[in-house]
Image (cartoon, coloured by chain):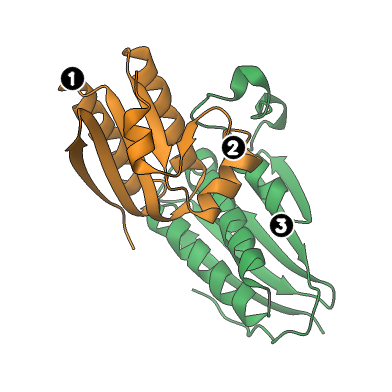
Chain colours: A green, B orange
Amino acid sequence: MEQTVSYTLDSTLETVDHAEEKATRIATELGFGEDEVMQISMAVREGAVNAVLHGNAYAPDKKVILAFERTPEDLVITIRDQGKGIDLSGIPNPLAPENLLKTSGRGIFLMRSFMDVVEIRPSQTGTEIKLIKHVHGPSAGVKEGSQ
Amino acid sequence: MSMKLSTRQVDGVTIVDCSGRITLGEGSVMMRDTIRDLLAKGNKKLILNLGEVNYIDSSGIGELVSAFTTTKNQGGELKLLHLTKKVHDLLQITQLYTVFDVKDDEAAAVKGFK
């Protein structure tokens, strides 16, 4: 049985913290271990940063949609913004020697490091980031809700 | 827990004791301002004590890199002290661990400045 919870959030710095807190709570409730909870919450934080800063550019009329879906095998987290769409070809490899001392550009890399699957779908009406973590053990459910 | 910073002097070296979260927003800005102020006042031997830092995001990592390069560009030297496991692991993943001068012992870190 699939269970989903979703939130509609403003394009603010507070949203980044709230997204991280929700991810921490839900991942903990689903029975993930401490290290995995940290990985999931950090990946969600980085996804929310992308949505708020680079996608919606703090625009008050644009929202961030954050959804958590529990399937039998996975925790699937979707983060959607209403920006112009991220240019994936313009994202440098942060591990390349010439980029190692850059002060930004590690968010998507960290998401890919911490999650089992990361799918990024840019479009002219926004970017959707899907973060998937495989569930290894028994877990509790996620209730319907919105904010 | 938000970020807190305090500075102290030990044998001509400035140690910045950091606690809490170095993340996008207040934590990153506080770190940046503190390093800039210290360098502007001529403090060029810096140690960031991260022993009480329990969380850092990509923005926080960027601030550590910025602190390191800004200090170096001004003829100074910056070391990191007492990394927590989380920060240590993040610096390993991002391959920055070998870029920074990381120390576990404060007295040795202070003595190690040129």
**Residue sitting at x 54%, y 54%:** B86
Vertical comparison of B72 with A80: above or below = above
Type of the residue with mark 3? Leu
Q: Picture coordinates of residue A13 (x, y %)?
A: 39, 52
**Residue sitting at x 55%, y 70%:** A24
The residue that disc 3 covers is A131
Count of residue discs: 3
Secondary-structure class at tag 1: loop
Type of the residue with mark 1? Gly
Q: CA distance from mark 3 to mark 1?
A: 46 Å
In front here: A138 or A118? A138
Quick check: marks 3 and 1 in contact, CB under 8 Å?
Answer: no
Task: Report which quarter residue A59 is drawn in.
Answer: top left
Type of the residue with mark 2? Arg
Q: Picture coordinates of residue A9 (x, y %)?
A: 48, 62
Q: CA distance from mark 1 to mark 2?
A: 31 Å
The residue that disc 2 covers is A106
A29 relative to B77 in the view: left or right: right
In front here: A72 or B77? B77
Task: Report which quarter residue B93 is drawn in.
Answer: top right
Vertical comparison of B52 with A3: above or below = above
The residue that disc 1 covers is B42
Q: CA distance from mark 3 to mark 2?
A: 16 Å
State which chain disc 1 sits on. B
**Residue sitting at x 44%, y 60%:** A17
Q: Picture coordinates of residue A41 (x, y %)?
A: 57, 62
Label drawn at residue A111: none
Say whether disc 3 or disc 2 marks the residue closer to the N-terminus: 2
Secondary-structure class at tag 2: loop
Question: Is residue A81 visible to the viewer in this orientation of the structure?
Answer: no
Crowd class of label 3 (few under 14; some 14 to 19; many from 20; radius 10 Å): many
